[in-house]
Amino acid sequence: MSDNQDADGRFPGSTWACHACVRGKCEVFGPPGTNQEGFHMNHGFGTGLLCATILASGIAAAPALAERILRADEAPIGELDPAKGTDYGDTVLAINLYDSLVYPAQGASGVQPHLATGWSIDGAVYTFNLRDDVTFNSGNPLTSADVVYSFERLMAIGQGHSGLFEGVVDSVEAQGDHAVVFTLTEPFAPFLASLVRLSIVDSATVMANEADGDWASVWMSQNSAGSGPYVVVSHDPQTETVMAYEPDYFLEPAENYPERVRYRYGLDAPAVRALMARGGHDISSQWLPPEVLAALAESGASLVTEAGLTGEYFKLNTRRAPLDDVHCRRALAYAFDYGTLLQLTRITPETTQGRPMSGALPEGLLGFDPERPYFERNMALAQEEQALCAHDVADYPLEVAWIAETPARERGALMMQAIYSQLGYKVAIVRTPWVLLTERVTNPETAPHVVEIAISAVSPDTDSLLFNMYHSSMPHTWMSSSYYVNPELDALLDEGRMETDPAARQELYAQANAILAEEVPDIYGYELLSTFAVREGVTFHNLADPARTYPVSGFNLRFMDISVPATE
Amino acid sequence: MPPPETAFTGNDRPVVTILSRLLRRLVSTLLVLFGVSLLIFLIARVIPGDPARIALGPRASEEQVEAMRETLHLNEPIIVQYAFFLGDLLRADLGISLYSNRPVMTDIAEYLPATLELVFLAGFLMVSLGLPLGALSARYRDRWPDDLIRLLTLLSVSAPSFVWAVGMVLAFSFAIPLFPIAGRISETIDIQVVTGFLLVDTIVAGRPDAFVSALHHVILPAFALSLSGIGQAARLTRTNMIATYEQPHVEMARAYGFSERDISRRYAFKPSLIPSLTVIGLDFAALLGNAFLVEVIFAWPGISRYGVGVILQKDLNAIVGTVLIISATFLIANIVVDLLVSVINPRIRLSEHGK
């Protein structure tokens, strides 16, 4: 991958010349009409080498075909196989290369039809009717047999989002070519939303590329076999995935949709900044530091944000003193300086990477209560709660860990150190590499007191967030690293899975959210808004119009919904 | 008294001596690689974190994590795990990378040439610029060219390569857009990859435009990577040449009326090469490790960047594979340097033969 004009070092319209003078004999390299201004050197090797490199810019300056290209990036690596991917970039690849039965509802919670035109629910039996006009990029028609195969493949590989269906689905059967029946082990309300993560693969193509019963696992990490709006042209997991638009796609693209997409990996911030300044890049990743985003905004890029059901949580270890006492936890929560933390996320006066939270739930999930007040700092209440705490906090140095790979989080840890010393805590800040953190959180007795971490819902259902974070049956991972045990909360979360009436579920999750706000297993720092720098001329329709925005992180980067100018 | 017989024999059969030296080094290299494989295998497993859980994520059930641990043989005793590893290694199978979800051998085959291309060019720049600069500096000792070269080389060795890389991107890609910012070749050029060395593949394909584009992309990262090596080579060559200039044979050459240019080339430069070459050889091998940050800055899809990525993800197969390959490259570079030195300096051949 590289840049053009720009990125490849092409300088359209420039006039240049390279004079090579060896032993008094001079030659001029350059395009016809080159003037005599340029580089002039007197040594053979140096001349040759430098001229060759300078010439490259000229040779590469040959006019390219006008094509609408979109160049975006994500860090650090991309997984093509929808049965393995879990990260943001993997989601973007999956939604552009594959389709699912349902999609997150635009501008609302829940799901909307996609490959499925409709469905019926009879207790634990879900019957989906499929569109009959969808073909895979291979030309094969998409049928219910492909849905069955895709599900079996996902579960057999046992990676990616298979955990959403583990123990939930009893059987999947095709009924004719365009109906499929999922029979669950018991009623499970989040099932429908989980299906946004079941990408349908072309079973014939995949089976043709299987080797030793591997479900074409290696092949699928290098190629696509979907029905999505784009098809893979080339893929290098450390460099970029090049995708081309599939003209026979069953949905209408936006005007001036990108015909070709270069989705790049592992670009660091200076490279993205330089590329965008030279017109060689269109959409940055969300991982740029705020100062780089601000610099890009100053140089003409627009900043757009995506609220992807992601919270920035300060997980409190409820198994280690003094945080096993709810009063100590409340004291920390009341003393926490939410305003300053939000100020740290501000990029420009108009754009911020965070918005306040009023509980454990981000906006847009069932159970979110818009009437709940946002958390605010209140030192008087903090001191009251501290007085009720059974522990003498001076006896327990508070270990605050921040993830070494995300240096911006050190600011939050330093802020906590400054604030909590006012309550008598001795705060030890520990820079912890991610791999080490994953090990430490498996043991509540030795895990840090506080860990700052961003956690997203993987489906537009509250269960995909709350259950993994707070149900006492979950294994000890970084998602559940507050180790909170509350039978009342467990019962609400269990009931939320069984209840199929949305209004009743809203009430159940609102109660759960209230308990979590009261019991403070975490400090709810802010709701994360992923912020992208977008080059002038590129329109991000899904994020420009709230009614078109998909609530789940990554789904708004469906490239055919973006308008781009033609690239000369 | 006649000289020892061995001296005559060794001098008469230098090729045999070099081959026998090469064979011994290859055997010792294999032993070292075996030791490295064992060491890195153990170290990779001591790093905290469950690779299966890291790969599958927090939403995976315990059963899924356990299944992956079984697949990776992580529940076996470590000696059994190592036996599995050696068995696979003999079949040239390093397993699947949890980082890229591809065979580790595929990743290495794809990324190693990119790094080697960068490192070879950086090594070439070290030799082709560092040695002449050192010779020039020694020849004009304590005059302005010497002062200028010493100043420049001091600057080049006083900052690590990634600092130069950032500076060069800002200067020559951002402020003065002479060079590309990222990648190995223009995205408008499609080239059939044969060796993975794009400078070679473009020639094989008969595409001068692609060759120039590949060179255009590699020159800045290679220069950034080589800068401190150039400085070190120049300073070392200067020091050695100054010492050589004070040798009696140089004085004698002057007394015979040889020109300074001839003395510099024939009598001062060659004897001064040996220590420089040894250090350059080590520097060259070290470039593989130093390449990481340069690869990050220039988005260069090389093995160093891949290596750091797999360590951060605790991708056991890929960690062991990458370290083995880098170690092998390091050892091969040392062998080549050893051979070169013994070619340049017959005394080393003779002493080896004497042993």
Image (tube, coloured by chain):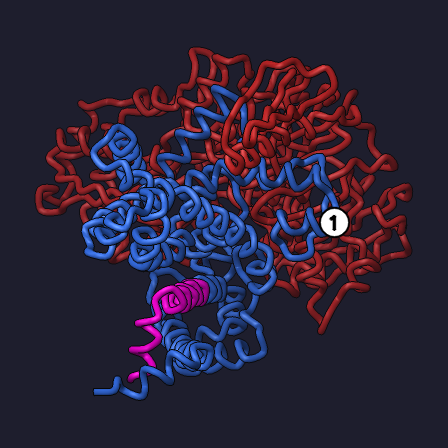
Chain colours: A red, B blue
| In the depicted structure, whether residue B150 falls above or below residue B44 | above
State whether residue A546 appears in this view: no
The quadrant of the rendering that contains the N terminus of chain B is bottom left
x and y, in percent, of residue A22 in the image? 56, 31
| In the depicted structure, whether residue B107 falls above or below residue A12 | below
Q: Answer whether residue B338 is magenta in the image.
A: yes
Q: Quadrant of residue B110?
A: bottom right
Please state the extent of the stretch shown in magenta in the rendering. Answer: B328-355
Chain letter, disc 1 residue? B
Question: Which secondary structure lies at badge 1?
Answer: loop
Left or right side of A546 for B259: left
Left or right side of B321 for A93: right
Q: Amino acid at mark 1?
A: Ala
Q: Residue at x 67, y 36 (%)?
A: B187
Q: Quadrant of residue A280?
A: top right
- Residue carrying label 1: B205
**From this viewpoint, which residue is outermost toward the front?**
B256
Left or right side of A223 for A4: left
x and y, in percent, of residue B41 in the image? 39, 71
| In the depicted structure, whether residue A467 falls above or below residue A568 | below
Q: Answer whether residue B331 is magenta in the image.
A: yes
Magenta stretch prevailing secondary structure: helix
Left or right side of A512 for B264: left
Along the viewing direction, whichever of A97 and B166 lies nearer the viewer: B166
